[in-house]
Image (cartoon, rainbow, N blue to C red):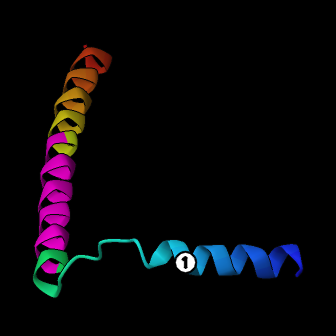
Amino acid sequence: MSKLGEYLTETKGELKHVSWPTKNQAILFTVIVVVFSIIVAAFLGAFDYIFAKILTFFIIK
């Protein structure tokens, strides 16, 4: 058996051991990731805005 064929056979066997999430779990996890991403983006955006204002204050003066 070729190495590729052996690899694919072993991979298929390993995938049988995976505990796949239910549809509801997948939706919940997706929502959590999206909400967390929005919170982090807002947090970083706020800091960027504040630092830009501070930098503008020092450059103009």
Quadrant where the image shows the N terminus: bottom right
Q: Which residue is mark 1?
A: 13
Q: Magenta: predominant secondary structure element? A: helix
Q: Residue furthest bottom?
A: 23
The total number of labels drawn is: 1
- Describe residue 1's horizontal placement relative to residue 7 as left or right: right
Q: Residue at x 37, y 71 (%)?
A: 18
Q: Residue at x 26, y 26 (%)?
A: 56
Secondary element type, mark 1 = helix
Taking the magenta stretch, the answer to whether it contains residue 41 is yes
Q: Quarter-wise, where is residue 52 in the image?
A: top left
Image location of residue 24, percent across then percent down: 10, 82
Q: Considering only vertical position in the picture, is 23 above or below 14?
A: below
Query: What's drawn in magenta, residue-wise?
Result: 27-43
Q: Residue at x 44, y 79 (%)?
A: 16
Quadrant where the image shows the C terminus: top left
Image location of residue 37, percent across then percent down: 21, 56
Q: Quarter-wise, where is residue 59 in the image?
A: top left
Image location of residue 57, percent across then percent down: 21, 21
Q: Residue at x 19, y 33 (%)?
A: 47
